[in-house]
Amino acid sequence: MADSDITLDDIAAVLDRRGYIYLPSPALQEVVGWNSEQWSGFAASWDRLGDDRFMADGGRYRRRRHAAFEASAERLRCKVHQPHFQSRDYNPLNGDVQRWFDPVENGIAQCEILQSIFRSLTPFFAKLDNHEPTGSWHSEMHQIRIETSPRELGRPTPEGLHRDGVDWVLVMLIARKNVEDGVTEIGDPDGQRLGRFTLTRPGDAVILDDRRIRHGVTPIRAMSDTEPAYRDALVLTWKASLAA
């Protein structure tokens, strides 16, 4: 099957069988249907992220913006800016802390690429979970840049192989510059390894059933110390909830 031939039914079958699916960029763009002409402006917003000041390991290698939404098949409503919170059961490094990140810029939170992703995947997840099609989800958006240099290793998931404490997760690569490694690792709830792959092209993605799958990314390393080295990713989550 060619990348561009995949359908939501194909994705559903794989998710039902193993709980995750790797989607090369052409495949995700085909099912979501965003306008590629808008990509450069969307990706450029990762150059404007603020520092992540909540790294319990003392690292200064992560930049981040965050937004929360009420998502349904009919609309995507941005909620009042709020902290990101995970219990230590899901994030043993940075859990049990209300983490206030800089908000996602309004133009990015409302952009057509993001709207297209939610418009396609929100009813898709509702169908997979046998939810009411018009039901709402609490969704969060994370823009994350992991930087690395000869002085500091960049760790996309310093908490290790983990779950996020939601229902569904989409992780999409935005950019890789001057880095190697950064391998996505997939495991079951008991930590048994199920798969490994590397998101290399802008738009490469993985969809995860967070209730069944743990995931992590190995550290990134700079290939050269003569220019900046970083990995940019978009993380979107869905959790069936009407909480504001």
Image (cartoon, grey):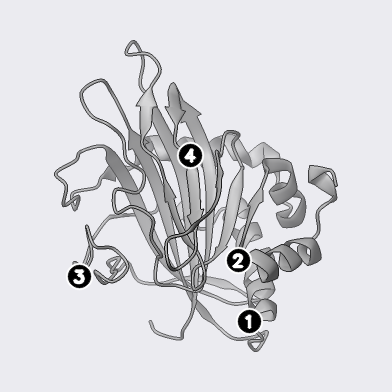
Quickly name the residue at label 1: 129
Decide which of tag 1 and tag 4 comes sooner along the chain. Answer: 1
Q: Residues within 10 Å of mark 1 (few under 14, many from 20)?
A: few
Mark 3–mark 4 CB contact (< 8 Å): no
Amino acid at dot 4: Val
Q: Looking at the picture, how far across and down is residue 46, in whole percent?
A: 42, 39
Name which residue type carries label 2.
Gly
First of labels 1, 3 by sequence position? 3
> What residue lies at 41% left-to-right and 55% top-to-bottom?
142
Q: Are marks 1 and 4 in contact (CB under 8 Å)?
A: no
Q: CA distance from mark 3 to mark 4?
A: 27 Å
Q: Give the residue drawn at x 20%, y 23%.
A: 151
Q: Which image quadrant for residue 219?
A: top left
* x 34%, y 10%: residue: 226
Q: Earlier in the sequence, mark 3 or mark 4?
A: 3
Give the CA distance from mark 1 to mark 4: 29 Å
* Amino acid at pointer 1: Asp
The one of 100 and 41 positioned closer to us in this rendering: 100
| Lateral position of residue 7 relative to residue 79, left or right | right
**Residue 54: image location, x then y, percent:** 19, 53
Which quadrant of the rendered structure holds the C terminus?
A: bottom left
